Image: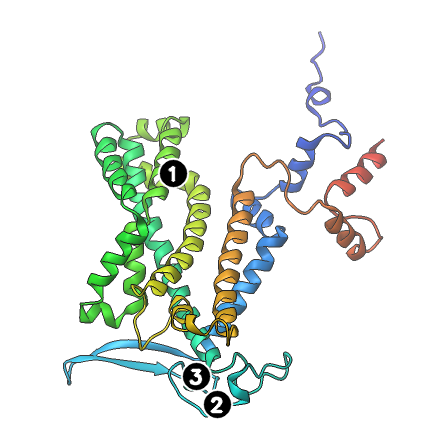
Amino acid sequence: MTTPNFTEITAPQPHGPGDELTIEQRETIGLSQGQIVWRRFVRHTGAMVSTAVLLVIVLLVFTSVGIVVPWWDFSEGKFTQIQVSGWWAYDWNSIAPIVNGGNPTFVSLFDWGSHPFGQDEIGRDIFARVMRGTQQSLTVMFIYGILAAVIGIIVGGIAGYYRGWVDNVLMRVTDLFLVIPTLVFAAVLGQLAGQNEVLRAYGAVSLAVVLGLVGWMSLARLVRGEFLTLREREFVDAARVAGASGRRIIFRHILPNALGVVIVSTTLLMSAAIILEANLSFLGFGIQPPDVSLGQIVQEYQGAFATRPWLFWFPGAFIVAIALCINFIGDGLRDAFDPRQRKIPGNGTWSRMWRTLTSRDGRPTKGDAADRDLSKADA
């Protein structure tokens, strides 16, 4: 009696060009889930361009006019400010002689002039004001996103994991917050915070905290839905049998598997935050003078729309650019974390052309075209 040769049965067989599962396996062989997500994200053109643009904006606004750090002066018993100067000649409140009739002096990328975004009617530099306003808007956006994500994860995670009366109580509280219009709720809290000296000194941070306290509800409901699904999975049952506590199961087993949804949703919240901050500042409930924000700049110069429209163009352009960048980054993260995506992005026409140009022998090194060449060689 001979022993069957299992090697012949289990050996991998040559695949054809249409075997998408094998192509995906060959693209991701030896990579962890984090590496697969990162590779998918960096091959998403829109997300990478948006990331580069956002980094340029952040670098520009925080280095040009410097930063201001409020702190409590114990010797005088009041708040004061420490200002770190930037490379730009003016700050957002300095008044200079009006040049070129207040019109923008920007000629080209290498010739900005003294006031590239122009000046207002009293001689304040609009470039410095837009840079400072963008600083404030970015600060609000990032702090708001982090705070809303933390609250949403805690509320949604606890409700989705424990269910029962805990779920009912937390979801009814969430529904109560959802009933109240966010803009009205944030305006009332912002007005109350403006009457406190400490909160007024930290204007952007205080506004971000106020928005975070009223902007976590949609993320909480989304996290709850993910937890309700994941808590029934086999790996969670195995953790329960092993004696893991509820807190450990939530943060070590369920949350990492829901992290993709959380990250994508947080980017969408951040994109909405910069619009909400601009609306609040436009209505007078956001950043208060002498500080500035993009919404406040638009509100301050609304009477000059017919005669000096550039006073709206530049702050409006920064609001739109930042919101679009965050949205494109969110799209890239969604595609990268999507487990239903069978292929890593980058197998399009332009990607194949680039790989062909950069390969040594003129043949694609990765992707569908490379698999077709390999299939022909196997045949």
> Can you say which quadrant of the picture contains the C terminus?
top right
Vertical comparison of 184 with 378: above or below:
below
| Label 3 sits on residue | 121
> Which residue is rendered at x = 68% and y = 19% of the image?
6
Of all residues shown, which one is farthest toward the bottom?
97
- How much space separates mark 1 and mark 3, taking CA atoms? 48 Å
Mark whose residue sits in front, 2 or 1: 2
Hey, which quadrant is residue 172 in on the image? top left
Q: Position of residue 280 (x, y in %)?
A: 34, 61
**Where 318 falls versus 246 (above or below)?**
below
The type of residue carrying mark 2 is Ile
Q: Residues within 10 Å of mark 1 (few under 14, many from 20)?
A: some
The residue type indicated by label 1 comes to: Leu
Measured as percent of width and height from the top left, residue 303 is found at 42, 72
Tag 2 and tag 1, C-beta contact below 8 Å: no
**Earlier residue among tags 1 and 3:** 3
Q: Residue furthest top?
A: 1
Please state which of residues 362 and 158 is positioned toward the viewer in this rendering.
158
Amino acid at pointer 3: Glu
Query: Looking at this view, is 262 or 188 the one in front?
Result: 188
The reply, left or right, for residue 187 in relation to residue 228 is: left
Q: Which residue appears at 74% of the width and 40% of the height?
A: 368
Q: Quadrant of the N terminus?
A: top right
**Residue 59: x %, y % from top left:** 50, 72
